[in-house]
Amino acid sequence: MTSLERARSWRPGPRLVSLVVGGGTAVLVLYPIAYLIQASLSVGDPQARPPEAYGLDNFTGLDRYAHIFGNTLLVAGVATIVAVVVGFVMGWILTRTNVPGRAALEQLMAMPYYVTPLMGALAWALIGSAGSGFVNQLWRAVGGSGHLIDINTAWGIAWVMALFEGSVAFVMIGAVMKSMDPSLEEASQVLGAGRVRTMLRITLPLVLPGVLGAAVFVFAEMLGSFSAALVLGLPSRFYVVTTAMYQLVSQYPPRFPTAAAMGVSLFAVMFAMVWIYRRIISSGSYVTITGKAFRPRVMDVGGLRWPLLGLCLAYLVVAVVLPVLVIVYASFQRLTGAVPSLANLTLANYAMALSLDAVRSALWNSLILGVATASLGVLLMGFLSWLIYRSRLPGAGAIEYLLMFPQAVPRLVFAFGMMWAWLVFPIPIYGTLWLLLIAYLTVFLPLGLRTISGVILQIDRSLEECAQMCGATWGHRLRTVTMPLLKPGLVAAWLLLFIASVRELGASILLMGPKSKVITPAIVESWFSTSSELTAAMALLQTLAVAAALAIMFAVARRAVQAGGE
Amino acid sequence: MTEHRHTAVTRRGFLRTSALAAATAPWLARAPFAAAQGKSTKVLDFQTGADVAKAEQEGEVVYYGHDGEAGIGVLLDAFKKDFPKIKTSYVRLQTGALYAKITAERSAGRFGVDVLQLSDISPAIDFQKKGGWEVHVSPESSAYKAEHQSSPAGHYNWGGVTFAGISYNKGKIKPEQAPKTWKDILNPIHKDGVSAKLATSGMQHAQWYTLRKLYGNDFWQEFAKQRPKGFDARAQLFDRLSKGDDRMCVLAEYAGYTLFAEKGAEIEFVAPPDGLPATAFYIGVVNKAPHPEAAKLFVDWALSKRGQAVYQNQKILLYGSLRTDAGPMPTGKRLADFKLLFPTDWNDYVASHPVFVKEWNSIMGL
Amino acid sequence: MSVSQASIEVRDLVVRYGTVAAVRGVTFTVGAGEHLTLLGPSGCGKTTTLRAIAGLERPTSGEIRIGGSPVFSSSPSVNVPAERRGLSMVFQSYAIWPHMSVFDNVAYGLRVRKRPEAEVKTRVREALELVQLHELGERGASKLSGGQQQRVALARAFVFSPSVLLFDEPLSNLDAKLRAEMRVELKELQRRLDITSVYVTHDLEEALAISDRIVVMRDGVIEQVGTPAEIYDRPRNTFVADFVGSANLIRGRRRPDLERDGLVVLETAGGAVVHGTSLDRRAGAEALMAVRTVRLRLDRARPATAVNAWPARIRQRVFQGDFTQYHVDWDGRTLIVRSAAAEPLAEGDEVFVSADPGYCVLLEE
């Protein structure tokens, strides 16, 4: 044993590092929440800091806004149902049938995630506004009266939200479908049950827990969604909790305590949802990499192949192609009309957009922030995933709950707490990009943790235990065994974090400063204070910048992999 | 005899005063913000109370304003052209949100703003009460009437005026239905087709207050039956109006109308005979500013003919200038050509703000 | 290859998970250089015990010493982390790291110990030669077959000369034929390396083949400890008799009046008299004996032995290749006899069953 002792000088044990990192992250999460709760209990002068008096008046006064809570539940409910149906149908088509081009389509299903909900909302506003929407203009041109669709309603908002969350639901449900043991279905068929009966009696019940889990998760996300309701709801006096909060703190005098009370109520509901979700998924086992890979049996659907393919393509068109085309079209117009005319074409919008400081510096800030968030985030969340799921240190379960907290809090609400919390912090990071970085890392913790831990849970424990038996300390194990095996998960997490931080709205809109502007709030500001054409140009510039950044990242990563060798 | 005594007294008085001045001069000189009455230098073609060299040394000015991004961009670009050594950065939010932000920051001990511009007088007066403004009487303020400055002077200044009438989409509203007076906006035929601004808008407060005084407290309750839609900025109001998403806008700022009419929108502007509610924007130097000299320079510039030319002639801003020597607006009209309705009792106006917010929010469905 | 051997002492080991006790008080020692096997059905606690020795499970109470020094103790509280115990382990799933080459897999333990690269190269090559994989050094480890992965796991385990080698059912993932081959190779490897080893398996043949001593476990406790021969020919109780090979159990009344020469005599309910060895075990008025199925002989004519020869009749015959299994009616019940004799007996034949008293073993109740 002496050779081992000699080889090791003092290194901080896993307990110490975990305490520091885990504890630090927990503080990051709890600090703003504490301020949020404090604000919600503040009665007396709404602007006094610290609060003059405490009480529950803000909560009891919320019944004035009962219709807003009702709106929120309605929109979230409808959106969830549509998203889950879309996700399930797509999942079933792409993993269990022999529709051609499945592999390519599966990759493409991630695209709606990149076309951010904001851009989708903007595009659908252009397509479906009762007055000036393209669809309605065409409708009137062919002789219809009034309007065919009105996107500025609860249904419109739910539709847009569902389109973009549908791809998330697809990913979750598809994963469940792929991990099903095909022999379970084969047994049913051997015993004489037909395809449909097998699907209904065997496949569906087995997949149901996963589908339910996805539904709960999507519902929780919908409760906190902001951009679609902001763009589409405000014009028709349709408020949900997040947009109502935004209005309340944006007016003078701002009504922080009421907004905070609303936020805490929403938080309570989302917390319950997330708790239910975790109960559902924890009642299953997730170790799939031990040598046995399931290849799900693909069903031959005969002539149905083509209609089903059409269905998938239709979804992609509606969720990706159509919005992008509309935005591109609008960005070149002086005054957008459904019928294009040469006189209306102009490059002025782009010229204006590029000249605006808001766009130039904001784009740059967003890209830098995106890279920083993704890189730091991957390291931090990789370590935290290991800490929670592999280290078997005491308190790991509590840390997991704590770090998933931000999932239950709408970003806007969280940023509100952060704004108050960090204003008083002695280190002058308020109004700088550092504050945004901390905010992003905190609110994206659940996203990163979920992605990476999905991969970590699939790594057989014995791979790390063996390294332990060979004498490697926890740090060495982490570096030489765990992290390399996690690489695909880490790369996926990096991409997700980068995209998420560039498209982030709810937190950024409250925490920006004069020198720390970022692009998505700038686009929203533009929508509200300039023309839709200029906004379209800005949105497109954002998309192009992100695409360019990703392309560069891919090239760099691929070169690194080739050089390092496998 | 009297003359001699007078002279003697004066001379002695003068000596005493100058001794006093000599004794206190160092203190006065060190005090950073001595009321610079009289101390002004000429730079470019206007007078400023700021130390220009020091301002350029500070090298930066932080501006908080309520105009649209494009408008602020135009304003700051013009300043940068005149003073290339001074960098500009800004935050744009609707007045309500802007004021909420700056007060939150200051209450936490963060002082990072140099110049503040608001579109509602209530927060401006509130800021004055809190001692937020730096008392700086701009040399350019001599071109403004006393009622167009803060009282006492030096806190904030009225930098320009915007006023609003009614505007409607010519394609959606037939000529016989077109509104001609303010009462016409209550016509049930326009239900679900009218737009206005949200409670965060200073202009909206002004309209609410003045029309209430004219037509009684029930006027806006009647208006609520029209189920109006509320928005954040005039660009959005006119964008929707031009496209026909709304049929009529009841807070149609003249500036917005001009801009969109030029783009070719099919809209019409109506100036009701009873008058057009008007509000100014209010600009001033912020106390404890990080770049005090640059701040003063900016405000002086904004109030000067140069700055006012930007505010008035740039189509995207189009604020009527209140300078007694101002030229006409780009449309050829002057402020005096319109019957403008300003609140007369400012204290009553300010006190009415919470009432306005509550009523307007519920009219807007919040 | 230099060899350091350590002894292992396990005393009163208890391992509890919540309310379930996987190991309920286990005590045994492994001498330096000895090959010990923990044998038992699934759920008996053998793997948990092994992992407790490794340091991968934390016991609830008890003591574990390696080479004389405690690596775990509940009082005073000691718990040396797994990576510092100087042991090595071969896992059931091989745990080959897919992102490294074969060479890097095997070299891992040496590199952790910061051995110079030249030494690493030599020792890895030697280890790979020992397991007959020397030509695969640079191959990516994920591209190996099951048997090859197993050998890499082995090489990796002993390359850095641990004082103890632990095996967690290393052959259970292989098919039967490969398992039989690997068993022999494993035994040869053990002989060459001569490291103290603790082996866990549920496979009887494996245990008998490679062990110096076997610990038979059930439900978290030890049923019997002994050499393979002892376990096989002298099972202590019903469980061991049944688990370690197939046996017939014969219950009967003691007949002390017929006992002589140190033998014990039982009379069955049906009247048959069976002589057997007592092995100094105590028995009451009623006792149980076990006779291995292969230790019973079938003859057409009565054999010449004085005792333990009874008439019987063949009821069923099952051909099993290496042997034939006969189900024989005897004493009102069925005896199972396995015979390798060439000449088959037919169903219905009248025969004589006999057994050497040395193979009729008295069981502790």
Image: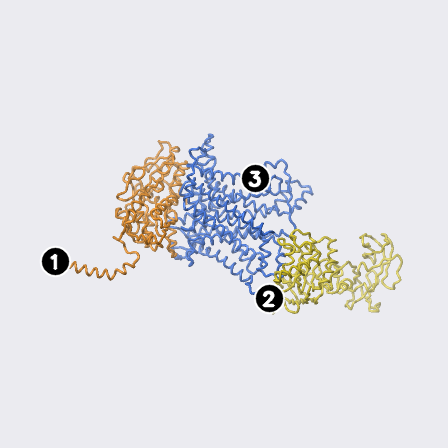
Image quarter of the N terminus of chain B: bottom left
Crowdedness near tag 2: few (<14), some (14–19) or many (≥20) residues, C-alpha within 10 Å:
few
Chain B drawing hue: orange
- The blue one among the chains is A
Q: Percent x, y for residue B340?
A: 29, 41
Task: Write down the chain letter for disc 3.
Answer: A
Callouts 3 and 1 in the same chain = no
Q: Is residue C57 visible?
A: no
Image quarter of the C terminus of chain B: top left
Task: Write down the chain letter for disc 2.
Answer: A
For marks 2 and 3, give the CA distance. Answer: 62 Å
In front here: A317 or A227?
A: A317
Task: Write down the chain letter for disc 1.
Answer: B
- Amino acid on which disc 2 is placed: Arg
Q: Secondary structure at mark 3?
A: helix
| Image mark count | 3
Which residue does the numbered mark 2 point to in the structure image?
Answer: A6
In front here: A295 or C255?
A: A295
Which residue does the numbered mark 1 point to in the structure image?
Answer: B4
Residue A312 numbered mark, or none? 3
Residue C111 numbered mark, or none? none
- Amino acid on which disc 1 is placed: His
**In front: label 2 or label 3:** 2
Horizontally, is A527 left or right of A209 in the view?
A: left
Q: Percent x, y for residue B258?
A: 35, 38
In front here: A318 or B366?
A: A318
